[in-house]
Image (tube, rainbow, N blue to C red):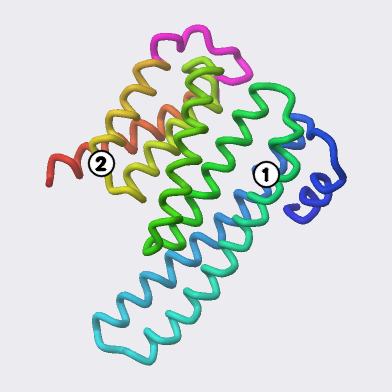
């Protein structure tokens, strides 16, 4: 599916909203598998190192490197499409915000694969801030794209930058803002909005616990 959608993008022109969603889902699934593999191998490498199984740890390190290269390659492919085709061709404000969020997500994934490289974190932070600002200006607090961006930005603060208190503040603000307009959510967005708000609540519970334990 990812390869098919890449060909659709490369054919030129602006994608329809449905095509944009298909592209997003296809690559999210692809990179999701790669991120999960990287995390499993990373945990295995650390475990084998701790117990002194150096040969096994070496094998795991090699697999981790392969998973990292595959994941970064996928991210760079998406970012190239965004910069070359998708963002320049986006004529609707909502579509542009959707792609800015997508760009922020894939820079964040690269930062996950390269936690030791400060430049990756800086690029991810820049992309996240730009997408977050665009969401705040152009979309209502209950719009799924804005809520999703708030969730991603808060997760970035927590997972990549280690800023738990900032993540909590952002998550609470997103929830509070959304609750003031929850009765006005269009029916076609309601399930997505409720789901994202539920994930935000779960994350806030985890982050608050972490903050209190420090």
- Prevailing secondary structure of the magenta residues: helix
Residue 25 in sight from this viewpoint? yes
Asked whether residue 195 appears in the rendered view, the answer is: no
Percent from the top left, x then y, of residue 146?
A: 51, 25
- The residue to which callout 2 is attached is 164
Q: Residue at x 79, y 34 (%)?
A: 15
Residue 198 placement: quadrant: top left
Residue 189 among those drawn in magenta: yes
In the image, residue 4 lies in the stretch drawn in magenta: no
User: Looking at this rendering, what residue extends furthest in the bottom direction?
Assistant: 55
**What's the residue at 50%, 40% (across, down)?**
127
In this rendering, the label closer to the viewer, 1 or 2 = 1
Q: Earlier in the sequence, mark 1 or mark 2?
A: 1
The span picked out in magenta is 179-191
Q: Is residue 111 above or below residue 186?
A: below
Of 31 and 156, nearer the camera is 156
- In the image, taking residue 102 as reference, residue 158 lies left or right, namely left
Horizontal and vertical percent position of residue 126? 46, 41
In this image, 133 relative to 168: left or right?
Answer: right
Image position of 37 with respect to 204: above or below: below
Work out whether 195 lies above or below 213.
Answer: above
Crowding near pointer 2: few (<14 within 10 Å), some, many (20+)?
Answer: many
Residue for point 55% across, 28% down:
145
- Measured as percent of width and height from the top left, residue 76 is found at 62, 56
| Residue 136 in the image, given as x and y percentages of width and height | 48, 21
Query: Which residue is tagged 1?
Result: 83
Element type at mark 2: helix
């Amino acid at each position: 599916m990812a390869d098919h959608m890449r060909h659709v993008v490369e054919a030129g022109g602006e994608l329809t909203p449905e095509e944009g969603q298909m592209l997003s889902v296809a690559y999210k699934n692809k990179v999701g598998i790669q991120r999960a593999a990287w995390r499993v191998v990373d945990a295995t490498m650390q475990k084998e190192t701790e117990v002194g199984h150096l040969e096994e740890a070496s094998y795991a390190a090699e697999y981790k490197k392969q998973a990292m290269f595959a994941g970064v390659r996928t991210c760079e492919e998406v970012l190239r499409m965004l910069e070359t085709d998708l963002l320049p061709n986006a004529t609707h404000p909502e579509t542009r915000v959707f792609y800015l969020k997508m760009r922020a997500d894939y820079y964040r994934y690269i930062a996950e694969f390269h936690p030791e490289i400060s430049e990756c974190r800086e690029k991810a932070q820049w992309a996240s801030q730009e997408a977050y600002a665009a969401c705040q200006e152009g979309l209502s607090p209950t719009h799924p794209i804005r809520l999703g961006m708030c969730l991603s930005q808060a997760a970035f603060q927590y997972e990549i930058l280690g800023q738990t208190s900032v993540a909590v503040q952002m998550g609470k603000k997103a929830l509070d803002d959304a609750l003031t307009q929850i009765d006005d959510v269009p029916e076609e967005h309601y399930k997505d909005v409720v789901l994202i708000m539920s994930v935000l609540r779960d994350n806030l519970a985890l982050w608050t616990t972490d903050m209190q334990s420090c």
